[in-house]
């Protein structure tokens, strides 16, 4: 019990609490839609998209010349949608298994993203560490003021993403269940 008491005495809500909140928001937001990917046996699509958004992030940086969240988010969303479309196109056109088509798409796009970053490394301030690795421990450092409260920007963004995912699942639950359990009928 002494170890628990000592650990809790070290707890700092402002620093540690926001990190926990960001982790929970991210986990719940991804789990809402991730369940349907697992039911469709497409869980690798999440892995494919996380690797394949790199060229979208690099392109967003080159266009906006900024590492701010909005351009990076837009670039990641566009690359993620293209990943899903390319995966389906290769699966249908090449008559290969979905896992194989995902493997081709995400490794190709990830390699393209790395090439884009390396080619521009001499001309811009974009190192692979800032787009490849997350740093959840830095969550409390970038805050916005909302109704007198300093809230980390990441928590605000993840709350919006969670709300969008929740609304999507609530609005399209019937369609999601139907397409997950009976794709031929859907």
Image (cartoon, grey):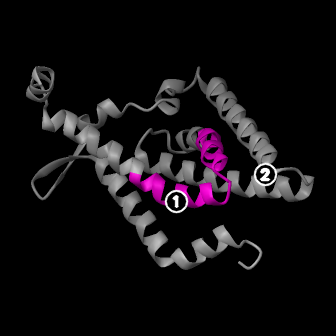
* Span shown in magenta: 28-55
Q: Residue at x 42, y 55 (%)?
A: 29
Q: Residue furthest front?
A: 1
Q: Is residue 29 magenta?
A: yes
Q: Is residue 160 above or below residue 61?
A: below
Magenta region, main secondary structure: helix
Quadrant where the N terminus is found in the figure: top left
**Residue 31 place in picture, x, y as percent:** 47, 54
Any part of residue 21 in sight: yes
Tell whether 71 sits left or right of 96: left
Q: Is residue 5 magenta?
A: no
Q: Is residue 141 above or below residue 150?
A: above
Quadrant where the C terminus is found in the figure: bottom right
Of residue 68 and residue 3, the one placed in the foreground of this image is 3
**Residue 47 place in picture, x, y as percent:** 61, 42
Q: Is residue 154 above or below residue 36?
A: above
Real-space CA distance between mark 2 and mark 1, rounded to the nearest whole angstrom: 19 Å
Badge 1 crowding class, 10 Å Cα cut-off, few under 14, some 14 to 19, many 20 or more, is some
Any part of residue 142 in sight: no
Of residue 70 and residue 26, the one placed in the foreground of this image is 26
Residue 55: assigned label: none
Callout 2: SS:
helix
Whichever of callouts 2 and 1 sits on the residue coming sooner in the sequence is 1
**Residue 10 place in picture, x, y as percent:** 12, 25
Q: Residue at x 31, y 30 (%)?
A: 137
- Which residue, given by chain and number where applicable, does mark 2 sit on? 98
- Which residue, given by chain and number where applicable, does mark 1 sit on? 33
**Residue 97 place in picture, x, y as percent:** 84, 50
């Amino acid at each position: 019990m002494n170890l628990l008491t000592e650990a809790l005495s070290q707890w700092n809500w402002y620093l540690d609490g926001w990190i926990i909140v960001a982790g929970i928001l991210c986990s719940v937001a991804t789990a809402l839609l991730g369940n349907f990917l697992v039911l469709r046996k497409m869980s690798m699509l999440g892995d494919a998209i996380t690797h394949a958004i790199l060229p979208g992030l690099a392109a967003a940086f080159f266009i906006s010349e900024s590492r701010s969240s909005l351009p990076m988010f837009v670039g990641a969303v566009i690359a993620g949608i293209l990943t899903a479309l390319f995966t389906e196109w290769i699966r249908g056109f090449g008559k290969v298994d979905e896992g194989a088509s995902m493997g081709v798409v995400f490794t190709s796009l990830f390699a393209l993203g790395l090439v884009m970053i390396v080619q521009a490394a001499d001309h811009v301030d974009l190192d692979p560490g800032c787009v490849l690795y997350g740093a959840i421990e830095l969550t409390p450092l970038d805050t916005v003021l909302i109704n007198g409260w300093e809230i980390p920007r990441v928590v605000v963004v993840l709350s919006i993403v969670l709300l969008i995912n929740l609304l999507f699942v609530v609005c399209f639950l019937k369609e999601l269940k139907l397409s997950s359990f009976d794709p031929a009928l859907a």
